[in-house]
Amino acid sequence: MMRIPKLIDRMDFSLMSPDEIRRVSVTKIITADTYDEDGYPIERGLMDSRLGVIDPGLRCRTCGARSGSCPGHFGHIELARPVVHVGYADTIHNCLRATCRKCGRISLPEPKLDDYRERIREMMAAGRKWWGVAHEVIRSASSVGKCPHCGEEKVKLKFEKPTAFVEGKNRLSPSDIRERLERITNDDALLLGINPKIARPEWTVLTALPVPPVTVRPSITLESGVRSEDDLTHKLVDIIRINQRLSENIGTGAPHLIVEDLWELLQYHVTTYFDNGVSGVPPARHRSGRILRTLAQRLRGKEGRFRGNLSGKRVDFSARTVISPDPNISINEIGVPEHIAKTLTIPVRVTEHNLEEVRNLIRRGPDIYPGANCMTSPDGKRYDLRYADREDLAKTVEPGFVVERHLTDGDILLFNRQPSLHRMSIMAHLAKILPGRTFRLNLSVCPPYNADFDGDEMNVHVPQSEEAQAEARILMGVQEQIISPRFGGPIIGGIQDHITGAYLLTRKGTRLTREQAQQLLAAVGLFVALPKPAVREGGAGYWTGKQIFSMLLPKGLNLTFKAKICENCTRCKKEECPIDAYVVIRDGQLIHGVIDARSYKALERCEVLDRIVKDYGTTIAREFLDRTTKLSIAAAVMLGFTTGIDDEDIPPEAKERIEEVLEEAGARVNKLIEVYNAGELEPLPGRSLRETLEMRIMGVLAESRDRAGGIAEKYLGLDNHAVIMARTGARGSMLNLTQMAACVGQQSVRGERLSRGYKGRALPHFKPGELGAEARGFVESNYKDGLKPLEFFFHAMGGREGLVDTAVRTAQSGYMQRRLINALQDLRVEYDNTVRDGRGAVVQFMYGEDGVDPARSDNGKAVNVEKIIERTIGG
Amino acid sequence: MGNTSKEFDIRLHVLVPKHEVLPKEEAREVLERYKVAPHQLPLIKSTDPAAKAIGAKHGDIIKITRNSPTAGKAIAYRYVIER
């Protein structure tokens, strides 16, 4: 173990006093030049070799270390005249306006100050910030007209951004400012928000300027041999030049005006040295006209030190490529291209048990797939297997070596898709090395990553240490994330075809021959004997789909629920349900009902999957899911499933009836308008007449659309494939279908009928103020027959709102999420079930008030009493 | 304490949960139970209408009993600070 040379006990962020600047300085910088003709750094120049080394081979004159290990050392510039530090201009302003210009005390009576002091002392003791109090002090003190301590009248002080202060008509020089700040007592400084133990107000006006080490502003040598200096160095050159001229002019007793001008110029250079983006100051530019990147610019913004380098670090052992689906691998697995597997490595420590194995890996080297790229001997020497005699190295390997071997099947990997909005955006998968160039993933893990295959790319990270691998396996494994902590239900489950396939298989009337049944089981990879056939006919046995599906259900599973296709009849016929929507599972046998979205679709109330995860554990749930999805796909393929626009065909008589309904609705709308125009419309409570009319019209039109849809639905039964998808919850909705088959309906923006565009009308084809159905965006056509031209434009207007909404919503919710994460990142649940922040302060006294983890609860409850009773008594 | 008879007593409002000042003994027990300093508890100003209504003063600990959708009843404690 490394010895810890020093322990950090406490950190303070404070100002540097001029004395401290001089104390840490290794040299005073007096010349603006950097290198002499021979290319050596000039003594007491900006590249003085005591400031650290950047050229390889040289030694630092301060610490003796070489470049790379020498951290660099500060120098300093003695400023001929003090200048204001831009970053503290606000602080200076506060100090000046809150204190008396003569005696330097805060312009508040002593008892009041004592009162404030007491409050601050209390807050300090509690470890809280007292800035709020300081602001109060400043606010009240700056409005006082006469100093209560010496009686001096206050003169109006104006802060001319960014660094100038004007009192009455006189402009205060930085020297004047510094003098005043010096007069503030330590006790008063505390009240102004400055802790005198670590900083004094006058230190905000600089008399000495620290010169950062050369390691902070390295010069680069171009191929032509020309040296190019860092922006900071350029800026420091400017400062030194002006500083020199200023001190010369002062020395020779130059006219006041010239000194003032130079002083102001020095202030400008020091200001832009700190921050080259201050408003009101023209930014300092490079000779080429490029704006210089000075201190504040290095820290600020997306690519600044904080967001770019500290919060956003780059990592090794990661890979990124396009994703594509693979229904044949487990949800736990991820297909990794061989090329990537040969680049990403895992360190293995050689022991006598794996010696032979490792030797083989070394012999195979970096190019033949399960091989190794590198090895390290116990004394830390590294061997690159690309260039070495591998046969030789394989012989020298012995226990204690570390070999970096290729990724192989079963290695644990972290898989991630941006934006990482919730914890399921990074999950641990087991590697499966496959040919090809894309990452392969099981379709059931698309919902947690929110992934599709229209060109999405994803990242992989390889945990290196045994500890990290174990942690990933136990905590981050895909199967551990089936239940989302967001709503306590499965976020990983069947999607789309999985649902349709299961429905086709389990619905009434599905009859399978022995061959078919066995083929389905083979697709699942289940090689067990078939149960007794449900039907015997002509000497041959036939199996129902329910029987086959039951073979995947764990023994002892008991469930009763209503399927997604349930029509919510007023009186449920239960087992006698005509559409088989009443699902009964007894001891792992599907006795009644069909399997659809309600049973195992991701992001829904999936009764079966949910129950299996919670009662049988994640491994069995994973197996169930892997198998069910394969079975469903195989069933859909075997039984045949397709959809096309003729699925939305409805007979001519239905079309006629729909037309009638719409015509009648149009007439009713016109009638309403007539009544309105006649002034006979009864207003609804709290609404104006216009609003009432709009609401009535919208009501009539919405109802007519529903009725038109209802007519179409009568002809769209469960033998229709599009309907199967909609009703089982696989994809699409009945609304989508009726919009295609019957009537699209009212288009709207912000919940109102379309009215904007032209004066008093939405399109120029109508009369201004026309209120009829078609003038305000009612689309009576359906998608299948096509929209009329005017309807098409109305539809585009309504559709636009949806697009804008999604764009705005993502931007807003992204920012909100950022703020929330910043605020909540340190919160955690302690062992006493309290939620505490980073300081150990209590946020909740009991997590969620009931201490229940939603991912492990049963519909939000810690225990489901009914289930337990049913299991013990009813079993 | 804080309210005269004619004023509306906010404690009667449905949305105001039950606030009560803990006796010193119980307050110490709470701090002991959660192993916290008073300032590590959630804070409440002594000028807070609910705190004023029960006459809580700086340094007191208030016990708040509210209805919870998850747990039925939930108890929270707050440390009273000035202003």
Image (spheres, coloured by chain):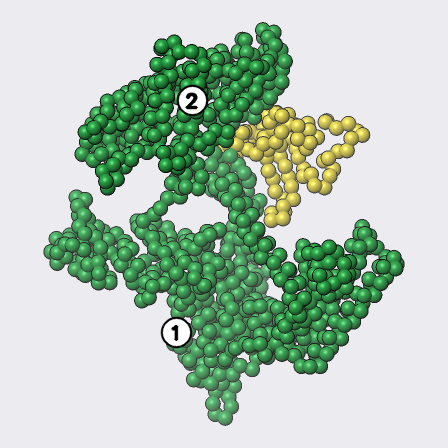
Chain colours: A green, B yellow
Q: Nearer the viewer, residue A836 or A76?
A: A76
The image quadrant that residue A459 belongs to is bottom left
Q: Position of residue B58 (x, y in %)?
A: 61, 25
Q: Is residue A453 visible?
A: yes
Q: What chain does badge 1 belong to?
A: A
Quarter-wise, where is residue A738 in the image?
Answer: bottom right
Q: Secondary structure at mark 1?
A: loop
- What residue is shown with label 1? A525
Residue at point 82%, 63% (across, down) = A672
| Chain letter for the residue marked with disc 2 in the picture | A
Determine whether, in the image, residue A244 is placed left or right of residue B78: left
Is tag 2's residue or tag 1's residue first in the polypeptide sequence? 2
Amino acid tagged 2: Leu
Q: Amino acid at mark 1?
A: Gly
**The C terminus of chain A lies in which quarter of the figure?**
bottom right
> What is the spatial separation of the Cα atoms under label 2 and label 1, in whole angstroms?
82 Å
Q: Which residue is mark 2?
A: A265
Q: Position of residue A539 (x, y in %)?
A: 48, 92
Residue at (50% x, 66% y) in the render: A495
The image shows residue A480 at horizontal and vertical percentages of 44, 57
The nearer-to-camera label among 2 and 1 is 2
Residue found 49% across the figure and 64% down from its top: A493
| Left or right of residue A641, residue A769 in this image | right
Q: Residues within 10 Å of mark 1 (few under 14, many from 20)?
A: few
Residue located 38% across and 40% down the image: A309
Task: Tell which of A665 and A251 is nearer to you.
Answer: A251
Dot label at residue A502: none
Tell me residue A231's x, y (percent).
35, 33
Identify whether A155 is placed above or below A862. above
Count of numbered labels shown in the rendering = 2
